[in-house]
Image (spheres, grey):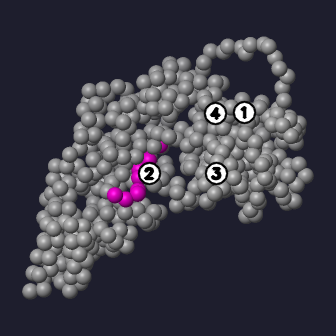
């Protein structure tokens, strides 16, 4: 059977889809939308791939699953997990990609009755309306990896001119890798799009050598309208008529800006955001998008990882230099070339960054992402008081957001408000207990307060997470030493000395052995 004949059969089967009638006058409850989403959303798993999908059609015992093509592009065999927990093997060779877009279908066999998606009218979706995204985050993306997630947001753009791979919808819902291919639903629980791309503007801050990160998200996620699927899956008669040329609207410029941003072409992105604002002066998302694009343009090579590390080492060194014990662990005046370049660029080319963020918040006082970006920017600039205040505003709107909590914890820590920072680090650790960063900063904060017993659980955990690192052994031993519990201090100090010896760090080894000898000769 040829490829195009297969697609003609798909087109003929469109009649089996649940096409929405004109929208009811009143939306159903969010709880009802969540119930619908859970029934129609499936988990798709392969040997090297993880994603989500949508129960779209049924022909006898054959179900058609709609998903993003990049979820299944690696080929091979996939399994589909439905709402009842059943796992279904994909029908062999059933993956079919729609031409020129990031969409594909695959098939499973089951005699069970599953709810199918009801299709909405994506052409009538308007900016600002509530939308809902469902899917299964990947294990590496979240501590909730593999667990179904349902998130609420607002439609940011519905462009008439899609960008590459058919993306035309932009929405603010929190999403994670692994949710690609899941449904984008309107307030009536009708399918208006297929989720495909999370916000790529994840500004990364990393402290120490752990794996914990801070992502400041703008809240711009991309989806493909359901009408794109319908237009490609439904056979159409050839025509020689040229498509009508329509002027670009604000949403089109916004999407064009997103396309440039994804390619890290920040100058055209800024220009397109400006065009969107010119057409719609109340476009809060365009103001925030323009601000973030300008921030990215000021960071050499967009190396936010290094920028965050330099920020941490600069202020951590400054904080610990007055402590006779910790000062040796964090060298004075560490080089921070990238941070210095960013600060200089910010002073010389401030652009409209801060006015744009302020405007976005003025237009939408509930704009969590705008508060988050403002908090992150103030953190980079060393304005810790402002960073704390903005993070508190954001967390009042989204209290369990770990990204915002991390910014707040860092701002509190770097400002010297150690006790409050510990409370936030404890919440972060509860959600991510293997983060070496959180344990390190919590331990240093308690140590700086002189509460050595409070710091000790952090060093104990780090000895387990990083058993080849001498520092947590040394610091735990020192906490006992400062409490004059000499017997308890010796095993840790000896272990630290041995690890220093193995690393060839003669100076630290000799210093540790000197302390050990003094204790033994008391």
| Residue 163 marker | none
**In the rendered image, which residue does mark 1 sit on?**
99
Tell me the CA gap for discs 2 and 1: 37 Å
Q: Nearer the viewer, residue 176 or 89?
A: 89
N-term mark: 1 or 4: 1
The reply to whether dot 2 and dot 1 touch (C-beta < 8 Å) is no
Residue closest to the far right: 60
Instruction: Tell me the residue that label 3 is attached to.
Output: 51
**Residue 111, position as x, y percentages in the image:** 87, 59
Could you say which is closer to the camera, residue 436 or residue 407? 436
Dot 1: within a 10 Å radius of its alpha carbon, few (fewer than 14), some, or many (20 or more) residues? few
Q: Residue at x 14, y 76 (%)?
A: 513
Decide: marks 1, 4 in contact (CB < 8 A)? no
Residue occupying the point 74% across, 62% down: 87
The first of marks 2 and 3 along the sequence is 3
In the image, taking residue 514 as reference, residue 142 lies left or right, namely: right
Crowd band around label 2 with a 10 angstrom C-alpha radius: few (<14), some (14–19), many (20+) = some
As measured in the structure, the alpha-carbon distance from the residue carrying label 2 to the one carrying label 3 is 23 Å
Query: Looking at the rendered structure, which numbered label has been put on residue 403?
Result: 2
Segment colored magenta? 209-217
- Tag 2–tag 3 contact (CB < 8 Å): no
| Residue at which label 4 appears | 165
In which quadrant will I find the N terminus?
Answer: top right
Q: CA gap, disc 3 to disc 1?
A: 20 Å
């Amino acid at each position: 059977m040829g490829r195009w004949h297969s697609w003609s059969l798909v087109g003929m089967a469109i009649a089996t889809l649940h096409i929405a009638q004109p929208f009811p006058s009143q939306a159903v409850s969010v709880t009802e939308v969540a119930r619908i989403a859970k029934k129609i959303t499936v988990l798709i798993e392969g040997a090297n791939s993880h994603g989500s999908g949508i129960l779209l059609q049924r022909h006898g015992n054959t179900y058609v699953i709609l998903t993003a093509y990049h979820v299944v592009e690696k080929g091979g065999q996939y399994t589909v997990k439905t709402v009842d927990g059943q796992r279904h093997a994909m029908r062999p060779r059933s993956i079919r990609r729609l031409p020129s877009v990031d969409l594909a279908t695959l098939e499973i066999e089951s005699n069970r009755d599953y709810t199918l998606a009801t299709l909405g009218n994506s052409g009538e979706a308007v900016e600002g309306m509530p939308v809902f995204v469902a899917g299964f985050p990947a294990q590496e993306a979240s501590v909730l990896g593999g667990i179904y997630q349902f998130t609420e947001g607002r439609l940011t753009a519905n462009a008439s001119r899609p960008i590459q791979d058919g993306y035309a919808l932009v929405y603010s819902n929190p999403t994670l890798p692994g949710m690609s291919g899941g449904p984008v639903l309107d307030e009536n629980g009708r399918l208006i799009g297929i989720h495909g791309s999370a916000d790529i503007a994840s500004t990364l801050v990393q402290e120490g050598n752990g794996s914990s990160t801070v992502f400041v998200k703008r809240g711009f996620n991309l989806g493909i309208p359901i009408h794109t699927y319908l237009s490609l899956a439904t056979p159409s008669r050839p025509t020689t008529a040229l498509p009508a040329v329509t002027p670009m609207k604000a949403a089109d410029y916004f999407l064009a800006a997103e396309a440039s941003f994804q390619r890290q072409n920040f100058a055209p992105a800024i220009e397109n955001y400006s065009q969107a604002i010119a057409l719609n002066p109340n476009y809060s998302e365009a103001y925030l998008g323009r601000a973030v694009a300008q921030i990215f343009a000021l960071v050499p090579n967009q190396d936010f990882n290094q920028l965050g590390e330099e920020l941490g080492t600069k202020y951590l060194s400054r904080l610990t230099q007055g402590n006779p014990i910790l000062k040796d662990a964090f060298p004075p005046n560490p080089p921070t070339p990238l941070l210095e370049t960013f600060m200089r660029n910010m002073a010389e080319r401030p652009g409209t960054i801060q006015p744009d963020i302020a405007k976005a918040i003025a237009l939408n006082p509930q704009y969590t992402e705008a508060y988050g970006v403002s908090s992150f920017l103030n953190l980079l600039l060393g304005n810790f008081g402002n960073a704390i205040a903005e993070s508190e505003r954001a967390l009042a709107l989204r209290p369990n957001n770990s990204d915002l909590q991390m910014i707040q914890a860092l701002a509190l820590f770097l400002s010297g408000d150690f006790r409050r920072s510990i409370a936030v680090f404890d919440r972060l650790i509860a959600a991510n207990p293997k983060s070496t960063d959180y344990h390190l900063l919590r331990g240093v904060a308690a140590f700086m307060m002189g509460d050595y017993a409070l710091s000790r659980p952090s060093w104990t955990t780090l000895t387990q997470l990083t058993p080849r690192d001498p520092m947590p052994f040394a610091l735990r031993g020192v906490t006992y030493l400062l409490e004059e519990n000499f017997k308890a201090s010796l095993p840790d100090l000896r272990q630290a000395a041995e690890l220093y010896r193995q690393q060839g760090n003669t100076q630290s080894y000799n210093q540790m052995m000197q302390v050990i000898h003094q204790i033994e000769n008391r």
